[in-house]
Image (cartoon, rainbow, N blue to C red):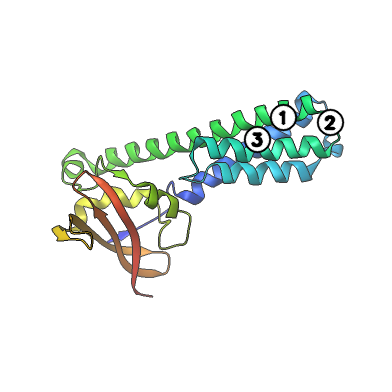
Amino acid sequence: MVTTAGTMSVAGAMLIGAAIGFGVEFFTQVTINGTPLEKVDWAKIAVSTIAGALSAIPGIGWWGAGLVMGGSQAAMSWIDGNDFKDVLLAFGIGFATGVVIYFASKVLNSLSKKIADKFRGSSQIADNPLYGKEYSDEVISKTWKDQHHNFPLFVDNFGSDGVLIENVLGDDGLLYDHLHIYGGYGQYEGRFEYIIDKNGVITHRFFKIIKS
């Protein structure tokens, strides 16, 4: 039985992005611009925080992350009445920050998996059908959609505890491997479903509720 706990999920990645967005704007106002704490523009910090969270969403890509953060910074600069040069500079700094947020979330996800691997043991890693596999772009784009798709990545480390059904014929006429890991997620009992193609790509990742 697998029960998921506080692990590096999409929500976790967005929280890190939000923290970076908050920190960058707060640092800019207080340290670089010398703004007193009582005169800090919290509306700008809120916008930067939200933009930071959005920049960390899996599947958005580094370019998208840069545009989200850069666009928000440029918009705030323009609202302040700055000239084109300053607006462009704000966009550049924001774009770079968004890219950093995006890659930072990816690194933290990777580290969380490596730490989990050490706890699981080398023999269980070798028996895990999900180990070393990659997600398709479609799966990544759905990880923030709802609770059925955005369960923590930590669950992937329990693949050796699942039931593997090999060579299932798909609707496209190709063969796939299906993996079902039974366990709990939140207040529900069910199974974590994965479908893996013959190229080692995970094309489906879904939590199916069996009992609430």
Residue located beneath label 1 in the image: 90
Image location (x, y in percent) of residue 173: 18, 59
| Residue plotted at (60% across, 28% down) | 96
> Which image quadrant is residue 117 in?
top left
In this rendering, position of residue 60 left or right of residue 48: left
Element marked by disc 2: loop
Label 1–label 2 contact, CB within 8 A: yes
Label 3 Cα crowd, 10 Å radius (few <14 / some 14-19 / many 20+) = many
For marks 1 and 2 on the same chain, the one whose residue lies earlier in the sequence: 2
Image location (x, y in percent) of residue 207: 35, 63
Residue located beneath label 3 in the image: 70
In this rendering, position of residue 79 left or right of residue 60: right
Q: Which mark is residue 82?
A: 2
- Number of numbered discs: 3
Vertical arrangement, residue 28 with respect to residue 177, above or below: above
Vertical arrangement, residue 25 with respect to residue 170, above or below: above
In this orientation, which residue lies closer to the viewer: 77 or 37?
77
In this rendering, position of residue 82 left or right of residue 184: right
For marks 3 and 1 on the same chain, the one whose residue lies earlier in the sequence: 3
Question: Quadrant of the image for the N terminus?
Answer: bottom left
